Image: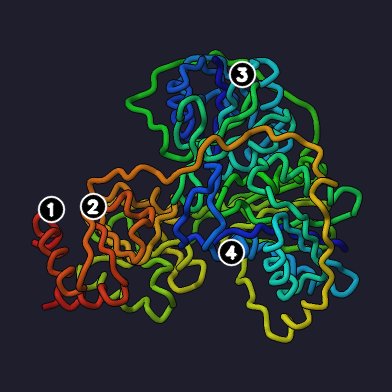
Amino acid sequence: MKALLIGEYREGKLLDNIYELVAFAGKLGADVSMVLVGDAANVPKVNGNLHLADVGKYGEYNPSAHRDLVVEAVQKENPDYIVFPHSSYGWDLAPRVAAKLKVAQVSEVVGLNDGNLEVGSCNAKMRRTVKPAAGKVVVTLQAGAFSYQGEQQGTPTISPLEVTGSADVEFIGYEPAEAKDVDLTKAEIIVSAGRGIGKKDNIPVIAALAKAFGGELGASRPVVDAGWVEHSHQVGTTGQTVSPKLYVACGISGAIQHLAGMKKSDFIVAINKDKDAPIGEVADVLIVADVLQFAPALTAKLQG
Amino acid sequence: MKILVCIKQVPDMESRFKVNSSGDWYSDADLAFRINEYDEYAVEQAVQLREQQGDSCELTVLSIGPDRVQEAIKKALAMGCDRGVHIQDNDVHKKDPWQIASIIAAYAKGKGYDLIFTGMQSQDRGSAQVGVTVAELLGHACATTLVGFEYADGAVKAKRELEGGVKGVVRLKIPALVTCQLGLNIPRYPTLPNIMKAKKKEIEAVPVASLLGEQPLSVTASFYPPAKKGGGIVLEGDVADLSDKLISILKEKTAVLR
């Protein structure tokens, strides 16, 4: 069994998610080779062939060239699994590679189950196992689903990788994240509002609870997208990753992107009408109640 | 200019899901369906571009599925799409992303769409593959996960959402396909006059068999609720009692209330 792992390079750095791909290959018992559009000074500490394309020549985001580079490496290595992180890089690139090779892709894999690949479904409320057709398969791995331990120590065997062809998307540049007016990463207590609070007018109810706890107000993505709360309060993959002593999730169903941003909190309380909401998976205490009734009651007790 | 927007109809994610009799997807019974949330942003962006381009522009909305998906198509028509395409398929859940993309590409091929919009993923299956694969099959430039969109002079300037709030700015020439992320815009609510107008708009029915030429590359082996990890305490009851219980748990197990 062979796995070809695709590294991700962003703003001049190799991202650590390559080691999660190594952990997945370890679970498969697969021999590892790698592809990276990067530079030789900054390569994965992993044993195996590394097909290295020059980021100066191909750029960090250049989907048609990156697709062709990965396909070129696939032809050299003949792997069973072609493995990407399920990230803005991986989900953009993987389907292009799968289509070019005309092989199955299984997205956001969270585990292996009886030889099949296990993925989330219906906003993480359900699971699905997927059986790809015989032959090669492209997979993207959910961030954090395959964890690695300890310092990596290997040394790759580097060979240069090149393709010809022109880019069909022009990369203009990065735009930095908006300045934060609150730094949630330093907060000891965070009380976050989710879509379950119903409307913007109910934000003060959650803000009052945050104040009663002496904590900061956080929010899930839909609440920020709807303009109820500033982006600087957003917790999750595209917001801030937090690990306070206490995290109180109010009316948050628990989409994976939100869980990824808060599941390392020391103690998690979730308030939700839906007993089956995925937030219950990470909560130390799940209060099954209408948050608009419960939050004011709790605020009053804390103040009293 | 010709624009296509592809939408999927999905259940409300607040629903309680039951496994169907063949054990490979949810049972449709008792579920309320709506437009996939990501696709609502795609429709809104497509309608805004349609308005910018004026009456020389035609915007088509396409959906694959059983008869109920016409409700989703009608909503998109009421939001401002010009015409609908219903690809009739009662077994849509058995098709893999490769087949779905090949069906859409087979429909779109040769029709000269300058821009195709899709959501970045569906809420129920979440493969995030179909849009990109359609672009590959048609040979269109493609960018995913848009939180910013501008069109001028035959090119799209797009902002892609990356991790940690960083964005990547890219430019792609038409013909192009873009996949839309949450927060790209504020999807409009159809007004009553527009809902009435939408009733008169054409919905072309196309049997899926006329477009499907590909075998699946993957199949669903099983579908089930995740095992409860347990460990957490579940509390129900009167809110005042619940508050007291929670406070005593927090005093016992955390240092935050001491």
Q: Position of residue A259 (x, y in %)?
A: 38, 51
Name the amino acid, label 4: Phe
Look at the numbered disc 2 and give the secondary structure of its residue: loop
Residue receiving disc 3: A79
| Alpha carbon distance from label 3 to label 2 | 42 Å
Give the residue furthest to the bottom: B193
Name the amino acid, label 3: Pro
Q: Position of residue B84 (x, y in %)?
A: 80, 65
| Alpha carbon distance from label 4 to label 3 | 40 Å
| Alpha carbon distance from label 2 to label 4 | 32 Å
Quarter occupied by the C terminus of chain A = bottom left
Task: Name the subunit of mark 4.
Answer: B
Task: Name the subunit of mark 3.
Answer: A
Same chain assignment for discs 4 and 3: no
Name the amino acid, label 2: Asp
Residue receiving disc 2: A284
What is the tally of numbered marks visible in this picture? 4
Instruction: Categorize mark 3 by other alpha carbons within 10 Å: few (<14), some (14-19), many (20+).
Output: many
Q: Which circle marks residue B253 in the picture?
A: 1
Q: Which circle marks residue B33 in the picture?
A: 4
Regarding residue B157, the answer to whether it shows in the image is: no
Instruction: Categorize mark 4 by other alpha carbons within 10 Å: few (<14), some (14-19), many (20+).
Output: some
